[in-house]
Amino acid sequence: MSSAITGSVVGASAGLAIDRLVGEPPDSVHPVVWFGRAMTRLEETTYANRRIQGAGHVLIGVGAAAAIGALVERLLGRAPAAALATALCVAGSMLDDEATAVASLVRSGDVDGARRRLRSLVGRDTDELDESEISRAVIESVAENTVDAVTASWWWASLGGAPAALAHRASNTLDAMGGHRTERYARFGWASARLDDVLAYVPARLTALTVAVVRPPRAAAIARSIRRDAGRHPSPNGGVVEAAFAAALDVRLGGTNRYAGGVEDRGTLGAGRAPRVDDIDRAIRLRRQVSAAPALAAAGLVVVTQLRKSVAGC
């Protein structure tokens, strides 16, 4: 393992630990929030209802993020820059907190409050969801964002340091801002949606594999669910990880969702029972284990590699 990769892996794993211990910085000083605001302002100049303008917009945003990452790496060094970038890019603690808050509202009987709080996690219409549908929506968000907001950032930081981590986060943020099937973004948002799919393709499948690793009794069911159900989901990456979570938790995800732009059938994912509120807690535990497992394994590999080098040098 090269010294550059070693530094990236150590830094990325440290960044995950920082997010777990400290959580998100306030919006007023959060670089991802600043980036979103800057790209919103830039869109006033770059927007046109064409794919080429959208591609240019994405190129500027992702390129700027990578350049900032390279500058930070030059100033701080490989491992510290990867740690800082990963801590800023991942949002595991925030995801857990929001999911827990929705579950607490459901348990207290405040279903209307749970529906309102759920809007921080999903884009679907939540006004008429019952307790099971609320639980399903939360678990699906936890599953999909395990990749988008946690593991993909770690994988890219481990491979390419701060520049790669920030570039991925920029792409994912731009997809969240404009990768929608609406009249305004049908063409302009095409590039951001496709780039985000490409950058998350391998991390999504590695994350699904990790789900099977941390839930070995369910490994066969997870593999069946992915093969049978993942293709029914409109997202090439979301379907893989949601199918894995559904089988690992032995619940049934997917189905019909209502959005402002219409109704979307996401197919059935998994062959278990309908989700319950307690399954939200199980999904959060699974998310934490799936996020930590590759970081711990990679850190262990780094330690073994360094020990072997020390022994060989003796």
Image: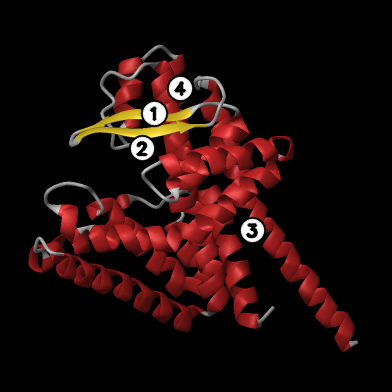
Q: Dot 3 lies on which element? A: helix
Earlier-in-chain disc, 3 versus 1: 1
Q: Residue at the location (36% across, 16% down)? A: 130
Front-most of residues 187 and 83? 187
Q: Which residue is mark 1?
A: 255
The image shows residue 203 at horizontal and vertical percentages of 52, 58
Proximity of marks 3 and 2: CB atoms separated by less than 8 Å: no
Amino acid type at mark 4 = Ser
The image shows residue 113 at horizontal and vertical percentages of 32, 20
Earlier-in-chain disc, 3 versus 4: 4
Q: Name the residue at the front extreme.
A: 228
Alpha-carbon distance for marks 3 and 4?
30 Å
| Figure check: 181 above or below 299 | above
Location of residue 167 (image quadrant): bottom left
Q: Residue at the location (91% across, 87% down)? A: 314
Alpha-carbon distance for marks 1 and 2?
17 Å
Amino acid type at mark 1 = Gly
Proximity of marks 3 and 1: CB atoms separated by less than 8 Å: no
Left or right of 195, for residue 188: left
Earlier-in-chain disc, 4 versus 1: 4
Q: Which circle, 2 or 4, is nearer the viewer?
A: 2
Q: Dot 4 lies on which element? A: helix
Which label is found at residue 295? 3
Amino acid type at mark 2 = Leu
The image shows residue 143 at horizontal and vertical percentages of 49, 41
Q: Residue at the location (18% across, 37% down)? A: 261
Q: Residue at the location (84% across, 77% down)? A: 308
Left or right of 74, for residue 303: right
Q: Which circle, 3 or 4, is nearer the viewer?
A: 3
Amino acid type at mark 3 = Ala
